[in-house]
Amino acid sequence: MNKFFWLSFADDSGFLGAAIVEAPNIIAAIQKAWELKINPGGEVKSLELPGATEDKLLPFVPNYLYSKAEIQALGGAAKF
């Protein structure tokens, strides 16, 4: 059964972006982010989003790399 994971990417220069990815586990989520070309590199921190569905994630959508400005415009990541 797949779950949703919030992936946040950063390097020494700062925040690189964040994405929500659906996968069976965190390793698969990071791999999927690479395959979808939404992993900008750097280090990744992750958070499983228990009970998340695509409807509950709105206005965020899976498999898209969000910038800091986009996250703030959508109400921030505090929703999760």
Image (cartoon, grey):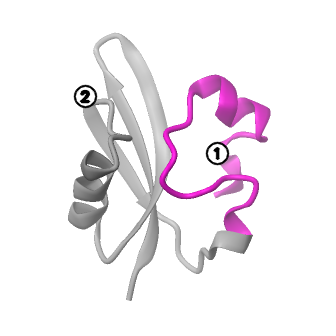
N-terminal of the pair, mark 1 or mark 2, is 2
Name the image quarter holding residue 11: top left
Location of the C terminus (image quadrant): bottom right
Q: Residue at x 30, y 41 (%)?
A: 44
Q: Which element is circle 1 on?
A: helix
- Furthest toward the top, the residue is 13
| Residue for badge 1 | 77
| Nearer-the-camera pick, 47 or 22 | 22
Image position of 58 (left or right of 61)? right
Residue 37: horizontal and vertical position, in percent?
32, 41
Q: Is residue 77 above or below residue 73?
A: below
Residue 56: horizontal and vertical position, in percent?
72, 70
Image position of 49 (left or right of 12)? right
Q: Is residue 41 magenta?
A: no
Location of the N terminus (image quadrant): bottom left
Mark 1, mark 2: which one is toward the viewer? 2
Residue 18: horizontal and vertical position, in percent?
48, 39
Name the image quarter holding residue 66: top right
Residue type indicated by callout 2 = Gly
Q: Is residue 74 above or below residue 70?
A: below
Q: Which element is circle 2 on?
A: loop
Residue type indicated by callout 1 = Ala
Q: Is residue 47 above or below residue 50?
A: above
Q: Is residue 66 magenta?
A: yes
Q: Residues within 10 Å of mark 1 (few under 14, many from 20)?
A: few
Which stretch appears magenta?
56-80
Could you tell me how many numbered marks the image carries? 2
Q: Residue at x 74, y 60 (%)?
A: 58
Image position of 51 (left or right of 26)? right
| Residue for badge 2 | 42
